[in-house]
Amino acid sequence: MRKPSNFLDELIRVRSDTGTLMEQNIAKTIYDIIASDAYFQEHPELFGAYDAGDRFNRPVVWALKRGKGEKTIIFSG
């Protein structure tokens, strides 16, 4: 598992100019970060990349990490 401080460093290094095919790069990086997490390695059905069908073939990367309580937090960007 990567350290959280490395997430930002890793994401900043990715060229992903808005409105270009390069946005696929950031989606792949986010997907790879999620896939490296031990929780998601045990629960691969709880993350993925949805083909949104847009003109740049940018997938929507998603993940659901189940907690112990009844509250849900959703992050979107």
Image: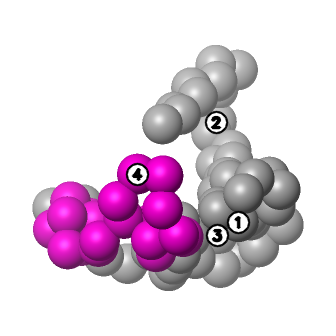
Point out the frontmost of discs 2 and 4: 4
Q: Image check: 69 left or right of 16?
A: right
Instruction: Residue under label 3, please give it.
Output: 40
Q: Image check: 18 left or right of 76?
A: left
Residue 37 in sight from this viewpoint: no
Q: Which residues are magenta?
A: 6-26
**Tag 3 and tag 1, C-beta contact below 8 Å:** no
Residue drawn where x is 29% and y is 73% of the image: 14
Residue drawn where x is 64% and y is 19% of the image: 71
**Tag 3 and tag 4, C-beta contact below 8 Å:** no
Does the stretch in magenta take in 19? yes
Q: Secondary structure at mark 2?
A: loop
Q: Image check: 46 left or right of 64?
A: right
Residue 56 in sight from this viewpoint: yes
Residue drawn where x is 65% and y is 79% of the image: 41
Does the stretch in magenta take in 28? no
Q: Secondary structure at mark 3?
A: helix
Instruction: Residue under label 2, please give it.
Output: 68
Q: Residues within 10 Å of mark 3 (few under 14, many from 20)?
A: some
Q: Amino acid at mark 1?
A: Asn
Between the C-alphas of marks 3 and 1, the distance is 24 Å
Q: Earlier in the sequence, mark 1 or mark 2?
A: 1
Q: Amino acid at mark 4?
A: Thr
Instruction: Residue under label 4, please give it.
Output: 18
Q: Secondary structure at mark 1?
A: loop
